[in-house]
Amino acid sequence: MISVVLATHNEAANITRCLHSVKDFADEILVVDGSSRDNTVTLAKKFGARVISIPNNTNFHINKQLAIDAAKGDLLLQLDADEVVDQELARFIAKQGKVAVESLSTSAPVAWYIKRKNDFLGDFLRKGGQYPDSVIRLFYRGKAELPQENVHEQLRVFGEVGTAEGHLLHYPYPTLASYLEKFNRYTSFEAERLWKLETRPSVLHTVKAFLFDPCRTFFLLFIRHRGYVDGWRGFLFASLSALHHPVVAIKLWETQESTQR
């Protein structure tokens, strides 16, 4: 049995495209919805999804792990609503779903990396560290879990990890506004995470965040990983990624000031 699991929050614009790509091989579709205000739940139920509605969590991986824990399948595919399974990957997943878990050898993979193509403002990025962008999303039940500590964390796997055939097509940033909305959310989450780890802003930390870290990030993405191959999209992506560091530093300072009032 193959279970496709998702955590959603206001994903009406994406959920139909996502679930349409898995409907032919998924025996179960399970959605943990974080109190969406749009018709995400209604659209998911049109595909026969079982929906669990809960309050939304700032750390979205908490909701994702709840979906994983509630799934009934032996083979699980964890997706984000803005991802699409291509046909080659769909065939690979269907093939793995026919393998009995108890028949696996100790050296066989219990989870798989999936290559991902990332769309940025209307086209897939080819370089800049954005391809193949391999993520662990396919695994046998009980063989992987999310640490639930960071925004961009990988599943923690208990066993061997292989590489799947095919791709996930990822559409996270159809517009600049959508990028900036997630940029704001992710930097706030990171500042909150650092504060909980008792990281406190300082002059040295701020100088590093405003000078060294942005320059290093831009160099890695645009020069070393050849983001220039993607033209203006590669330049803009590298530049915005570099801005992550000073914005997190500013939000740390804001957190400290608010606690001192």
Image (cartoon, rainbow, N blue to C red):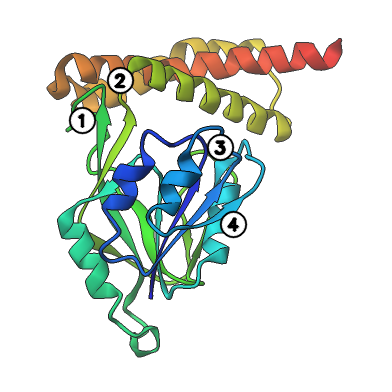
Distance (Cα) linking label 1 and label 3: 30 Å
Distance (Cα) linking label 2 and label 1: 9 Å
Q: Position of residue 212 (x, y in %)?
A: 45, 15
Judged from the image, the secondary structure of the residue bearing numbered disc 4 is helix
Point 38% across, 76% down: residue = 1
Task: Confirm or deny contact between disc 1 and disc 3 (CB under 8 A).
Answer: no
Task: Confirm or deny contact between disc 2 and disc 3 (CB under 8 A).
Answer: no
Point 59% across, 24% down: residue = 188
Task: Confirm or deny contact between disc 2 and disc 1 (CB under 8 A).
Answer: yes
Distance (Cα) linking label 4 and label 2: 32 Å
Asked whether, in this view, residue 242 is left or right of residue 86, the answer is right
Asked whether, in this view, residue 122 is left or right of residue 27, the answer is left
Q: Earlier in the sequence, mark 1 or mark 3?
A: 3
Q: Position of residue 99 (x, y in %)?
A: 29, 82
Instruction: From the viewer's side, name the closer residue of 195 and 236.
Output: 236
Q: Earlier in the sequence, mark 4 or mark 3?
A: 3
Q: Earlier in the sequence, mark 2 or mark 3?
A: 3
What residue sits right under mark 2 in the picture?
237
Query: Amino acid under label 2?
Result: Phe
Distance (Cα) linking label 2 and label 3: 29 Å
Query: Amino acid under label 4?
Result: Leu
Crowding near the residue tagged with mark 1, few <14, some 14–19, many ≥20 C-alpha atoms within 10 Å: many
What residue sits right under mark 1 in the picture?
125
Q: Position of residue 42 (x, y in %)?
A: 47, 45
What residue sits right under mark 4 in the picture?
66
Judged from the image, the secondary structure of the residue bearing numbered disc 2 is helix
Distance (Cα) linking label 4 and label 3: 16 Å
What residue sits right under mark 3 in the picture?
36
- Answer yes or no: is residue 165 visible: no
Query: Amino acid under label 3?
Result: Ser
